Amino acid sequence: MKPRRKLLNADPIVEPRPCDVPGCKAEAVHRTAAARDRLTDTRWFCLAHAREFNAAWDYFKGMTPVEIELFRRQDVIGHRPTWPFGLGAIGVGPLGEALRDRIRDAFAGAGMYAKARAKPRPAQPTPARRKALAKLDLKPGSTRLEIKQRYKELVKRYHPDLNGGDRGGEERLRAVNEAYRILMNRSTA
Ligand SMILES: [Zn+2]
């Protein structure tokens, strides 16, 4: 039988401290270590902000260092991608800093994060590609998957066979096909 643990010594009462997020008046309940090797350097968040931090962390967890870096750069230059619900401006402020620290820490072991940072900036899209993206009403940083999904939508919308024989869609469909061909061609990507 396991010995019963004494519960006499309760945690010492600590002063309530405010959430680290500026403007947040809530009491911090959740301590987040900024990095494994700096356990004393911690952030204090209220429950709501701790949840936001954890949601952002979960969101990034499945990405490779390169993807995370690209994502962050897009954020910096204002091509804000679709955030998961409730994330807000996670890239800035104490939440963003804590997140960056944790991401860096997560990849530090393999030296992957440093390698990702050293990668050159991705080339700007060519004018042809930029035009093609605009034609499909897509943002500059769109992924191949996003392009494919959009293409499928537009084909459905404009295909004469799917539009009760509307011939006006034919010209638009041709333009959509041409734009799609440019975007899927890796040499012009
Ligand atoms: Zn807060």
Image (cartoon, helix red, strand yellow):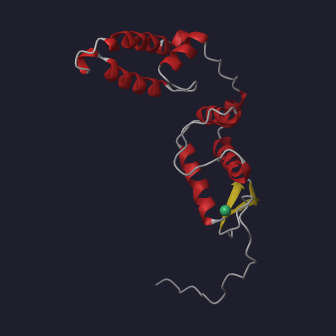
The residue sitting at 69% across, 31% down in the picture is 77
Q: Is residue 155 among what the camera can see?
A: yes
The vertical placement of 10 against 107, above or below, is below
Quadrant containing ligand 1 reads: bottom right
Identify the residue at image location x=22%, y=19%.
Answer: 164
Q: Is residue 98 left or right of residue 132?
A: right
Q: Quadrant of the C terminus?
A: top right
How many numbered discs sit on the rendered protein?
0
Asked whether 157 or 105 is in front, the reply is 157
Q: Where is residue 56 in the image (x, y as percent from the top left)?
A: 58, 49
174 with respect to 40 (left or right): left
Residue in the image at 42% along x and 14% along y:
176
Image location of residue 126, percent across then percent down = 61, 12
Camera-side residue: 178 or 108?
178
Left/right placement of residue 135 relative to residue 111 reads left
Q: Give x and y (percent) for residue 38.
A: 76, 55
Q: In this view, does 42 lie above or below 111?
A: below
Residue drawn at x 72%, y 60% is 43
Indicate the quadrant where residue 6 lies.
bottom right
> Vertical placement of 176 versus 14: above or below?
above
Asked whether 34 or 165 is in front, the reply is 165
Q: Is residue 159 left or right of residue 110?
A: left
